[in-house]
Image (tube, rainbow, N blue to C red):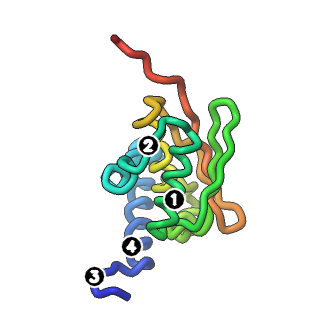
Amino acid sequence: MKKNAIPKDYANNVIYDLQKAFWDERGRGARFRTTTVGREYFLEKCLSLIQSAELDHIIQTINEVLKDENIAEAASYSMEDRLLRVQVEGCIHLQVEEKLIAHGVEPFTCVPANLFALAIEEKLDRPVELAEVKLEDEACNILLVLFDERPSLK
């Protein structure tokens, strides 16, 4: 391990403790307070790489960042009407979600999901809501709801 590297178990345990404390304080309302977790990372690592306002390009760019930064092994998606379903495999934060579930807390935030949402909001000017995070077969299945483009006052 690099001298300045943070051990993954340490980081995930801290993330778990913070999420669990927030859940204990706010319950389901915690979901609506964590939508911007990862914003600084998005601004530093992702935004400049997104060269198109096409949804496929946006998602593919975030997927590449997740892989290149060793955050996740892969992400795939499907779009149906306003529903964007993303499956994230090999995420370094999977153990956080597993611990939450083991302690009776449904997963309510996901940094990779937030990166996808932040990118869509920034490039398409469409509000996005994280509706669901489910674990299945060592992967996170994320449901994002994309709303209509914000009206312009021009």
Pointer 4: residues within 10 angstroms few (<14), some, or many (20+)?
Answer: some
- How much space separates mark 4 and mark 1, taking CA atoms? 22 Å
Q: CA distance from mark 3 to mark 1?
A: 24 Å
Residue hosting label 2 = 51
Q: Amino acid at mark 3?
A: Asn
In the rendered image, the residue lying farthest to the top is: 154
Give how far across and how far down residue 15 sits, in percent. Answer: 40, 65
Disc 4 marks a residue whose amino acid type is Ala
Asked whether residue 94 is in view, the answer is: yes
The residue positioned 35% from the left and 12% from the top of the image is 153
- Near mark 2 (Cα within 10 A), the count class, few <14, some 14-19 or many ≥20, is few
Mark in front: 3 vs 2: 2
Query: Residue 150 in the image: x percent, y percent?
Result: 44, 22
Near-viewer residue (48 or 74): 48
Decide: is 28 above or below 97: above
Q: Residue at x 59, y 43 (%)?
A: 56
Residue placed farthest to the left in the image?
4
Q: Viewer-nearest of labels 3 and 1?
A: 1
Mark 4 or mark 1, whichever is nearer to me: 1
Bin the neighbour count of mark 3 within 10 Å (Cα to Cα): few under 14, some 14-19, many 20 and up: few
- Identify the image quadrant of residue 73: bottom right
Q: In 3D space, how far apart are the residues under numbered discs 2 and 1 (Cα atoms)? A: 13 Å
Image side of residue 23 versus residue 141, left or right:
left
Q: Which residue does the numbered mark 1 point to in the structure image? A: 64
Name which residue type carries label 2.
Answer: Gln
Question: Which SS class for mark 4?
Answer: helix
Residue under label 4: 11
Residue, disc 3: 4
Q: Secondary structure at mark 1?
A: helix
